[in-house]
Amino acid sequence: MARRTKSRARKMLSGRAFLDTLVQCPQCHSIDVVQYGKQANGTQRYRCNNLACPRTIFLLHYHDKGRLPAVKQQIVAMTLNGSGVRDIVRVLKVSSATVIDVLKKNNGPLKS
């Protein structure tokens, strides 16, 4: 039993045990989250195991501002208020390709 305690202590010192318990899903706030690989830039990816959660994969720190869910919602909201792509690019400081991609992929129900 002493060996088991030492291995757990080593895991906690390495940070992995703490990381697994502190990460929450930003959508459903569930703690049933596991590590799910890494991005090309080295950022850790996580997966929410809650079946009722609509968002399965997420990052804690997004490298690109245009990938943030809040920015995507702002793009859709600005479009519904009559702003053009160039206006959105200038105000939010994201690329025009990001704006167009978000508008193409937004096929769900609109929330106002």
Image (cartoon, grey):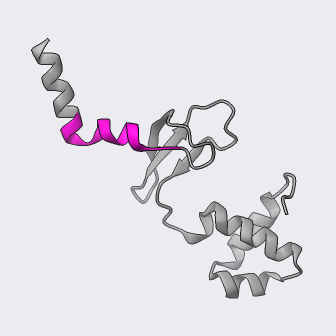
Q: Residue at x 54, y 68 (%)?
A: 64
86 to 12, vertically: above or below = below
Residue 33: in magenta span: no
Q: Measuring from the top left, give residue 3's x and y in whole percent.
A: 12, 17
Measuring 67% from the left and 38% from the top, which residue is drawn there? 53
Nearest the viewer among 39 and 31 is: 31
In-image side of 75 versus 79 (left or right): left
Does 23 lie within the magenta span? yes
Magenta region: 12-24
> Could you tell me residue 21's position as x and y percent?
39, 37
Placement of the C terminus among the 4 image quadrants: bottom right
The image shows residue 1 at horizontal and vertical percentages of 14, 11
Above or below, 87 against 68 in this view is below
Task: List x then y, in percent, for residue 59.
Answer: 51, 53
Q: Quadrant of residue 73?
A: bottom right
Q: Main secondary structure of the magenta part?
A: helix
Q: Residue 104 falls in which quadrant of the image?
A: bottom right
Quadrant assignment, res 54: top right
Q: Would residue 63 be found to the left or right of residue 5 on screen?
A: right
Q: Nearer the viewer, residue 42 or 57?
A: 57
User: Which residue is at a point 61% across and 32% down the rendered structure image?
Assistant: 50
Question: Does residue 32 sit above or below 112 in this rendering?
Answer: above
Of residue 39 and residue 34, the one placed in the foreground of this image is: 34
